[in-house]
């Protein structure tokens, strides 16, 4: 079983300069919880999750965080995203993705092709589908 067999291959992504409110609503509309983030050259530069939108890491550094909970478009994706992105290759075994998701406690990983282009996302839910399928084999 390979990552490509279980990943979501429709890449719904955010741009660095997208507003957080617009990103939140795009996630809700599409029923997703993680989005790869691309720069203007369409290079993968981060990942943002619904959790990042609910409570970005940087709010803990502020004394008065109340204003950060107003989700608007003044704050940008680049302000809340995770920048050090772990990825996996589409041709890697699903066990490798499960290992990263478990060890690092991630909800999803961007999936890259051999050229390094983002071709999908594999989530913990996708990994559970693979586990279910392995039980019925």
Image (cartoon, rainbow, N blue to C red):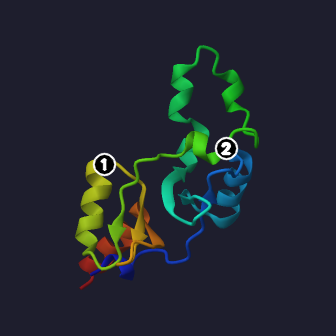
Residue drawn at the location 56% of the way across and 76% of the way down: 10
Point 69% across, 52% down: residue: 18
Q: Name the quarter where the N terminus is drawn.
A: bottom left
Q: Residue at x 56, y 60 (%)?
A: 38
> On the image, which quarter does residue 91 sit in?
bottom left
- Residue 134, position as x, y percentages in the image: 25, 78
Q: Residues within 10 Å of mark 1 (few under 14, many from 20)?
A: few
Q: Which residue is mark 1?
A: 104
SS category of the residue bearing label 1: helix
Name the side, left or right, on which 65 lies relative to 120.
Answer: right
**Left or right of 25: which side holds 96?**
left
| Discs 2, 1 touching: Cβ within 8 Å | no
Please identify the quadrant where the C terminus is shown.
Answer: bottom left
Q: What numbered label is drawn on residue 76? A: 2
Q: Is residue 19 above or below residue 135?
A: above
For marks 2 and 1, the one nearer the N-term is: 2
Are there few (<14), some (14-19), or many (20+) residues within 10 Å of tag 2?
some
Q: Quadrant of residue 73?
A: top right
**Residue 36 drawn at (x, y percent):** 52, 60
Q: What residue is shown at x 46% (from left), y 47% (from top)? A: 83
Q: Nearer the viewer, residue 41 or 105?
A: 41
Q: Classify residue 110 as left or right of residue 95.
A: right
116 w.r.t. 75: above or below: below
Q: Nearer the viewer, residue 8 or 76?
A: 76
Q: Which of the 4 image quarters holds residue 72?
A: top right
């Amino acid at each position: 079983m390979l990552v490509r067999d279980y990943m979501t291959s429709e890449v719904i992504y955010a741009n660095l300069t997208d507003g957080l409110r617009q990103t939140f609503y795009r996630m809700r509309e599409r029923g997703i919880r993680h989005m790869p983030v691309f720069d203007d050259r369409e290079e993968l530069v981060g990942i943002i999750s619904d959790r990042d939108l609910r409570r970005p890491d940087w709010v803990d550094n502020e004394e008065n965080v109340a204003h950060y909970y107003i989700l608007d478009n003044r704050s940008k994706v680049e302000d809340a995203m995770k920048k050090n992105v772990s990825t996996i290759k589409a041709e890697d075994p699903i066990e490798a993705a499960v290992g990263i998701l478990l060890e690092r406690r991630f909800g999803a990983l961007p999936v890259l092709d051999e050229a390094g282009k983002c071709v999908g996302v594999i989530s913990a839910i996708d990994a559970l589908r693979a586990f279910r399928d392995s039980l019925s084999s």
